[in-house]
Amino acid sequence: DAGITQSPRYKITETGRQVTLMCHQTWSHSYMFWYRQDLGHGLRLIYYSAAADITDKGEVPDGYVVSRSKTENFPLTLESATRSQTSVYFCASSLSGVETQYFGPGTRLLVL
Amino acid sequence: DQQVKQNSPSLSVQEGRISILNCDYTNSMFDYFLWYKKYPAEGPTFLISISSIKDKNEDGRFTVFLNKSAKHLSLHIVPSQPGDSAVYFCAAYGTSYGKLTFGQGTILTVHP
């Protein structure tokens, strides 16, 4: 299917485990983004990428790692999950910048 | 430091009436503003935007107003419909800043 997809949609893990959230888009958009949504904070940018092999930190990057070896994929890894990383994670993409972004359906992550 | 603020966590409106969602920002470098709409278990979707060179932009039932001197924007929905019930996020972008900054969101409930 065309569009932007995220997997898994739901994930339960334990403190200290490594977790990878996947994001895939079929539009060949240059830009991709990872956000987390928490009550009272709205959407906060974790990392973004302007093109393959180019990534940069957002507002809340600590504890997260990203890579972008292919234009269509932008995985987000929690190297050692903590309870404070319990959240809903959204991936987004845009053609040429940040003006209008297209969001995936989200991944709900619970860290016990 | 919350640069984009939506001070009303929720808003309840009767079907057919006007819904007004408000957003304030602090960074004068923002020059483009967007509203996103989010249903439960889905990613946010783009709704309407406005450039800082305008003070109003209209798209069907949705109108966004920008007051640069007050650093305030609002989204008007007329008439409101039950299907408009969702979380609405205000977002701002500055060409020199390079990233979208989101507000906390406002939950709109439209009662039949």
Image (cartoon, grey):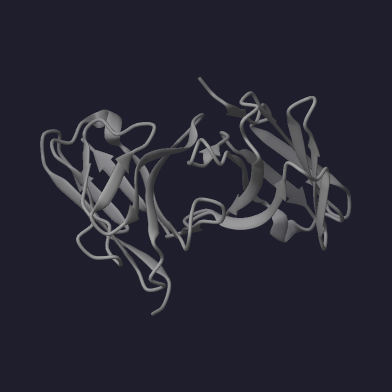
Q: Residue furthest top?
A: B1
Find residue B71 and report its image quarter: top right
Where residue A35 sits in the image (x, y, percent)? 40, 44
In the depicted structure, whether residue B15 falls above or below residue A110: below
Q: Nearer the viewer, residue B40 or A99?
A: A99
Residue located at (39% from left, 62% from top): A30
Q: Farthest residue toward the front? A: B96
User: In the image as oriented, which residue stretches furthest toward the bottom?
Assistant: A1
The answer to whether residue B87 is left or right of residue A15 is right
Report the residue at 75% width, 30% height from top. Answer: B72
The image quarter in which residue A106 lies: bottom left
How many marks the image carries: the answer is 0
Residue A53 appears left or right of A99? left
Residue B36 pos. (x, y %): 61, 51
- Of A17 and A99, the residue lying toward us: A99
Residue at position x 65%, y 44% in the image: B32
Query: In the rendering, at what x and y percent does residue A58 appear?
Result: 37, 36
- Please tell me in which quadrant of the rendered image residue A109 appears: top left
Q: Quadrant of the N terminus of chain A?
A: bottom left
x and y percentages locating residue B14 in the rendered image: 84, 48
Quadrant occupied by the C terminus of chain A: top left
Question: Does residue B6 appear left or right of residue A4 in this picture?
Answer: right
In the picture, measured across the screen, residue A43 lies left or right of residue A87, that is right
